[in-house]
Every structure is written in structure tokens, then in C-alpha cells.
Image (spheres, grey):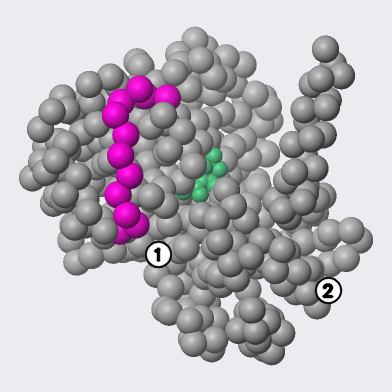
Amino acid sequence: MAGSLDDFASGKLAALEAVALRRRLIETDRREGVRATRNGRELISFCCNDYLNLSQHPEVKRAAIAATEKYGVGAGASRLVSGNHPLFAELERRLAEWKEAEDCVVFGSGYMANLGIVPALVGAGDLILADELSHACLMSGAKLSGAEFAIFRHNDLVHLDALLAARRGTAKHCLILTDGIFSMDGDAAPVAELAARAAHHDAWLMTDDAHGIGVVGRDGRGSSFMGAEKAAVPLQMGTLSKAVGSYGGYLCASRAVCDLIRTRARTLIYSTGLPPGAVAASIAALDFIRANPDYCRRPVEKARGFARALGLPAPESPIVPLILGDAEATLVASALLEAEGFLVTGIRPPTVPAGTARLRFTFTAEHDDADIARLVALVRERIIPRKAAE
Ligand code: PMP
């Protein structure tokens, strides 16, 4: 039987290789600042989600080390058994307060949060409406839930209205899912408008703010805080693995919702709690973020400077996509930048829709303006002309 299994795997890999869609893990040694070593070469990384460079911050590291010394390297059990070490309550209290929610639940990762939250809230007889560019883990949570599932065109409120008018009536509950900041395009969802529609139709809005927390909205509070007033989003989900620099996922919501999630979300109940070091690092990183609002604005400012220099639309987040279309062309462009000392991973389907393979540049607080200027020149002289020639 092993023969047919290996034949299956090799055949699949060959088919993916033929269309430039095979993926490979490449050892990447990230240390101080924005530098990463690959294949013995030091590169400047423009493809890391560590937007505030807090994964390397001395205070954050110190907090992780101290917690590890005190509580050990692992939680030892699911949070509901005996893994709920004292740092969880501290982190959840801070996140809830910061997001102006009653309560918060911390999960093992952002991916696990979405896989746990969505099926705990909706199921058979309910309806999920999701933006077509929502992150893969929101989509997976939706599939797991067993609820009816429909997709609305990206940020298209008219399409959402039509779906709500046609389908909300027959569903018991309705959950609307969207990224707050879209992971591969960097644009923001119209969160306030979505919240208003959701309230009007008695639907529940859930935003995934993985790329918003720490870098957008009032003092880095995320996509619910981008307007003059906080948008009324009852389910604010996010991750601690990007601007917060650590690991873990969270949901900020009402006390009743959080209590239900603690009782029903399978990825919380049946998975070991986060290591104390990771939770302590998140606490220290949040303290840093709250004390340094100007620093938190830097990633978006740097992204804007880069986009402006290339005549690209002004980004709302630290993410700037340059869509090349073809997967092969994207790999070639990425290799060209790497040869010049820049790490910018090519993003290909199925991470992005077919025909929209791209370079995805991400900016961090510590990027040097001179390095950005060099990158702009390379993209302008070597990548954009190739794109135009296709
Ligand atoms: N949501 C979005 C929008 C993301 O980009 C990611 C990470 N790629 C996740 C969720 C998953 O978060 P985590 O890495 O903490 O599992």
C-alpha cells in the first residue's frame, strides 16, 4: 500500500511543479531587525508579518524567558483541564480592555481561533456570508460549521445586501465573516458599513484582524477603530503572531459569547494551552504597543512611502501587493530581488485567486528608508517593465 501512497504524492507534486505551484520550506534565520539569512546570504526581508519587530524586542524576550523560568516551557494540558496558567487572565484582560470589549478568549493560534469560533456559533439551519478574500482559516471554520455558506464579492456591500435580502429570512442565525485588513491585498474592509448592515439584519459580524492589530486604527487598536467612532463589531478576532510578535489567537466579544466559546469551541477545549513564554511575550508586547502609538504608525507610513514612489494606490496597512498574474513570473521576480539582497516571497494560488500571483511587500517599523529607496528603484527598473511587457 505504501507504493500507491508514494505514487499518489509524487504524482501530485509533479503536477504542481509543472505549473510552478509546488512549495518548499527554506530555512530562514531571522535575528535582529529586518535581516534574514537564507542559503548563507544575508537578505533584507520585506515579507515578514512582524510589523513592529517585537518578536526580537529585548523586553518581550525577557518576559518570555522569565515566564518560562517560572512556569516551564509548556502549559501541560488544555486550558480547561490544568493548562490555564495565571498569565492567560492577564493577557485576556488587557486585550478586552484595549479592544473595548467585555471579555476575551485566547486560543493556540489565529487559525485555531477561527476553526473553533465559527462552528461554536453557527451550524445546520444557519447562514454564513463571507467576503471572497477572507483568510483560508475563516473559510475552513465556515466549512466545518455545517452552516449554509455563500460568498460575497470583495468589499461589495451591494452584493452583500442582495444576499442578505434573498437568504437571511430562512436562516435561523446569520454570521458575516471578513478580514479587517485583507492579508494578501492589504486593503481594509468597510467595517462600519458591514456592522450597520449586520445590525439591520440581525446578523453577527466577525472580523479577522490578524493584520490590523498593532498597526491600524486609533493607536493601533485595529480595524474596528479606523473610523471616527469605533465600529460596532461584536466578534473581534485576531492573532498575536504578527504585530504582537508572539503566538496565539484571540476573540474579543461580550462576556456571554466568550463564556460560550470557552464551553464549546473545540480548538480551545481539545488543544493544549499556549506556552507561558508565548503568553508573557504577548503581554509585554501589548504594553509596548500601548506606550508607543507613534512607533505603531511607522509600518503603514513606510508602506505608503513605497507605494507613492511607485505610483501604486495608497495602502491602508503595512501590506503592498504587486500583482504579476503568472505564478512563474512571480517566482522569477522574487528570485531577481533575492539576487539583489531582498527577501520578498512570491504569493501564488491557492493562497490568492488564479491569475493573481503577486509579490507581497510588507513593511515594518524598523525598515531603513535607504533600503526602501533601493527596493523602489529595483522594482521600478526591473520588475514593472517585465510586468508591462507580458
Ligand atoms: N487570519 C489571517 C487574516 C491571517 O493572515 C493569518 C495568518 N496567516 C491567520 C488568520 C492565522 O493566524 P495564526 O498565524 O496565528 O495561525
Which of pointers 1 and 2 lies earlier in the amino acid sequence?
Answer: 1
Q: Depth check: 39 or 8 in front?
A: 8
Residue that carries the numbered disc 2 in the rendered image: 339
Cα distance, mark 1 to mark 2? 29 Å
Q: In percent of the image, x 58 and y 67: which residue is there?
A: 325
Please provide the residue range marked out in magenta. 144-155
Q: In this rendering, is residue 226 above or below 388?
A: above
Q: In percent of the image, x 45 and y 63: which residue is there?
A: 186
Label 2, ligand 1: CB separation under 8 Å: no
Q: Quadrant of the N terminus?
A: top right
Q: Is residue 17 left or right of residue 236?
A: right
Percent position (x, y) of residue 103? 29, 33
Q: Quadrant of the C terminus?
A: bottom right
Residue 374 among those drawn in magenta: no
Kind of residue sitting beneath label 2: Ala
Per the image, label 2 sits on a secondary structure element best described as helix
